[in-house]
Each structure stands twice: as structure tokens, then as C-alpha cells.
Image (cartoon, helix red, strand yellow):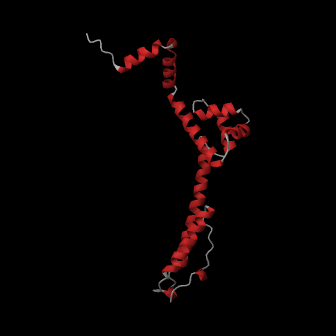
């Protein structure tokens, strides 16, 4: 019989001898709790990113949440099994969403609908401005006027987050 042990068997022998198998117990625990640990780590990364973006310290976050800085530290290690209460406190303190619910998804859909409505309104305005009139059929619009109109729409859309451009047809003279 071959007495060669696999790497896994050697590893299990090694860790089972260490302080009553403490390491083995920890590894088994991590394996059993892998699903929520990954979610906790993902939440921790999002919180850390938001703290950096907003220029907020861990201590300030703790104060906003009404918890100790040590609790925030545990959360940011990504190994804390967070309650819905704690998640809600974080969301309120940072003004972000960590968990998508029907409520937050409806809010996002509503926001996207507003953006789409604004874009649609802008496109209709463009079509109205540049659509040849019956009395001017065959007249081409100057390329520079068209580019100017589009750049104004892009600027307005990017700065306001929606398209509420008010365009007067007289601003964009048709080339004769």
C-alpha cells in the first residue's frame, strides 16, 4: 500500500495538531459562512469607497451612525454579520444604498424614466428645429449650426442630469 499523503491530507494533519484544531475549526467556520462573508466584504468595500469619495473618516461615520469607532472598524473588515438595522444606519449616514429592495428599485426606475423623458423631449425639439419646413423644402441646415445645437444639448444634459433645453427656432437660422 502506498503511504504517500496528498497535500490536503498533510494540511489537515498539520492544522489538527495546532492548539486543539483551532485553525481547522476557523477554516470550517469560514467555509460554512462563505456566502454572507462575501456579501459583508462587498458591503465593506462599498463603504470604504464611499468614505474616500465623500472625505469622511471612520470616526465621523461612527458618530453619524451612533455607534463606536470599533464597530465601524469591524464592519470595514468585512467579517461582521450585519443586521438590517446596522445596514440602514450606514445607508442613512452615507446617503447610499447597500441592499436593493423593491422600494429602492422603484426609485431608480422613476429616476431613469425622468432621464428618458428629458432625452425624448430634447430629441423631439431637435427634430422640430431641423425638420425642413414645407416652404423651405430642399434647404440644407448649416453644419456648424447643427453642431452648435448638439453641443449645447450635450452640455445642458451633462450639467443638469436631464434635458430641459429651451431652444428657439430663431437661434438656428437655416442656410439660404
Q: Which of 74 and 30 lies nearest the eye of the viewer?
A: 74
Q: In x, y percent, where is residue 3?
A: 29, 12
Farthest-out residue, left: 1
Observer able to see residue 7: yes
Residue displayed at 46% across by 12% down: 17
Q: Establish if 57 lies above or below 132.
A: above
Q: Establish if 67 lies above or below 94.
A: above
Q: In x, y percent, where is residue 56?
A: 67, 44
Q: Establish if 24 lies above or below 74.
A: above
Q: Which of 132 and 9 lies nearest the eye of the viewer?
A: 9
Residue displayed at 64% across by 33% down: 73
Farthest-out residue, bottom: 176
| Position of the N terminus by quadrant | top left
Q: Which of 162 and 73 lies nearest the eye of the viewer?
A: 73
Residue displayed at 59% across by 44% down: 49
Q: In x, y percent, where is residue 102?
A: 60, 43
Q: In x, y percent, where is residue 52?
A: 62, 45
Amino acid at each position: 500500500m502506498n503511504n504517500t499523503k496528498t497535500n490536503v491530507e498533510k494540511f489537515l494533519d498539520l492544522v489538527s495538531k495546532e492548539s486543539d484544531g483551532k485553525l481547522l475549526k476557523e477554516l470550517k467556520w469560514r467555509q460554512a459562512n462563505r456566502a454572507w462573508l462575501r456579501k459583508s466584504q462587498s458591503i465593506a468595500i462599498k463603504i470604504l469607497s464611499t468614505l474616500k469619495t465623500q472625505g469622511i473618516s471612520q470616526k465621523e461615520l461612527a458618530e453619524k451612525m451612533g455607534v463606536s469607532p470599533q464597530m465601524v472598524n469591524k464592519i470595514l473588515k468585512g467579517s461582521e454579520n450585519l443586521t438590517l438595522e446596522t445596514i440602514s444606519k450606514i445607508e442613512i449616514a452615507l446617503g447610499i444604498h447597500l441592499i436593493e429592495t423593491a422600494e429602492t428599485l422603484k426609485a431608480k426606475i422613476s429616476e431613469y424614466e425622468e432621464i428618458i423623458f428629458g432625452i425624448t423631449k430634447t430629441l423631439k425639439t431637435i427634430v422640430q428645429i431641423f425638420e425642413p419646413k414645407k416652404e423651405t423644402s430642399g434647404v440644407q441646415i448649416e453644419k456648424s449650426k447643427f453642431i452648435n445645437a448638439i453641443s449645447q444639448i450635450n452640455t445642458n444634459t451633462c450639467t443638469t442630469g436631464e434635458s430641459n433645453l429651451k431652444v428657439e427656432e430663431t437661434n438656428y437660422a437655416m442656410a439660404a
